[in-house]
Image: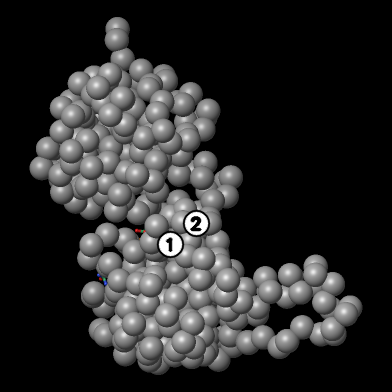
Amino acid sequence: MTKPVCLVTGGATERMFGRLAEMFDVIRAQGVTDAVLDAHGDRIEYLLSMYHGGVSGAMMERMPNLKAISNYGVGYDAIDTPAAVARGIAVTHTPDVLNDEVANTAVLLMLAVARNFLADNAYLKAGRWAAEGEAPLSRSVRGMTVGILGLGRIGLAIAEKLRVFGVEVVYHARTQKDAPYRYYADLTEMARDADILIVITPGGAATRHLVNRQVMDALGPDGILINVARGSVVDEAELVNALQDGRLGYAGLDVFENEPHVPQALIGMDNVTLLPHVGSATVETRQAMGDLAVSNLTTFHATGKAVTPVPECRDL
Ligand code: A2R
């Protein structure tokens, strides 16, 4: 019997390919390219998207038999979900399995910035400890107020981890949650009261540039901005200006507006710690994400229901 065709874009592991091959005829590609669509568009029924370029409505149009798109990651802003819903295509993602890892990344980044650890590491390795003496003092987070922007699955995991650091956790989201932290209906007001702002909302149009000049100014010259969500949530040009002007103190960033391109101005700043979008990037967590991304397709094919559809597709 012929198997349905599954297109896999990006770098899946052999473990993932092995499981997919039991049920599907797998096509491997770097992205949903014209060449792939010309050659296989009509035959593709399933798509596992690991490529950051995502899947547009125009691409879906050229895959008329597409039934489900499995997004490798919890954030699915690169998939045109409204277009998928309009075509009856199920979109799935990988929530929860990465909460702990991304929360660890947020806390590590926060502490690395406050304690100036990466600069201190460079100071020692450059021989400056022996030549010039002790490194400059850094900041203690104890007693600080940490504002979390987006208190969802990962935001809550961050809040729980922060309990041991002697900080006060507050948050902003569109709606108040049943959580033991002070809620701010207004983001700027929260930024004014916070010493540290951790961004962990989804990306996409609704959150684009939520962290704007006004929010950065409210966080202030001693404030620390941590972004482990999506680059699009922070106005990057304004961030560079705010850091250069000293209106914002420090930043720790795992995500950028135009990845993998990072503004040279940020790279040159001592008060900024930068990571190449590694929030969930451990062997263990990526394996769990890969397992769930594959299970979403195999389960959907076997039962017509995915394991973790995105909210917009729960009724499909
Ligand atoms: O706004 P609410 O009440 O729906 O709360 C969600 C919040 N959020 C927003 N907050 C303020 N303004 C907005 N426009 C806005 N849109 C959403 O972000 C909720 O508290 C949180 C998202 O939580 P979850 O959906 O549980 O997402 P999860 O698993 O925590 O992942 C967040 C993002 C991913 O989408 C990736 O971009 C990244 O973390 O890895």
Q: Secondary structure at mark 2?
A: loop
Query: How dense is the environment of label 1, judged by Cα within 10 Å: few (below 14), some, or many (20 and up)?
Result: many
Q: Is residue 129 left or right of residue 75?
A: right
Q: Is residue 38 above or below residue 213?
A: above
- Location of the C terminus by quadrant is top left
Q: Position of residue 51 (x, y in %)?
A: 39, 41
Location of mark 1 (residue): 256
Q: Earlier in the sequence, mark 1 or mark 2?
A: 1
Give the quadrant of ligand 1: bottom left
Q: Is residue 26 above or below residue 117?
A: above
Q: Position of residue 79 (x, y in %)?
A: 27, 46
- Location of the N terminus by quadrant is top left
Q: Is residue 288 left or right of residue 283?
A: left
Residue at x 51% of width, y 45% of height: 286
The quadrant in which residue 40 appears is top left
What amino acid is found at the position of numbered circle 1 in the picture? Phe
Q: Position of residue 234 (x, y in %)?
A: 36, 71
Of marks 1 and 2, the one in the foreground: 1
Query: How dense is the environment of label 2, judged by Cα within 10 Å: few (below 14), some, or many (20 and up)?
Result: some
The quadrant in which residue 304 appears is top left
Residue at x 19% of width, y 35% of height: 60
Residue at x 15% of width, y 33% of height: 61
Rounded to the nearest whole Å, what is the CA distance between mark 1 and mark 2? 8 Å
Q: Position of residue 3 (x, y in %)?
A: 31, 15
> Observer-nearest residue: 268 or 196?
268
Location of mark 2 (residue): 277
Q: Secondary structure at mark 1?
A: loop
Pointer 1 with pointer 2, Cβ within 8 A = yes
Q: Is residue 249 left or right of residue 115?
A: left
Q: Is residue 238 left or right of residue 91?
A: right
What amino acid is found at the position of numbered circle 2 in the picture? His
**Residue 57 appears anywhere in the view:** yes
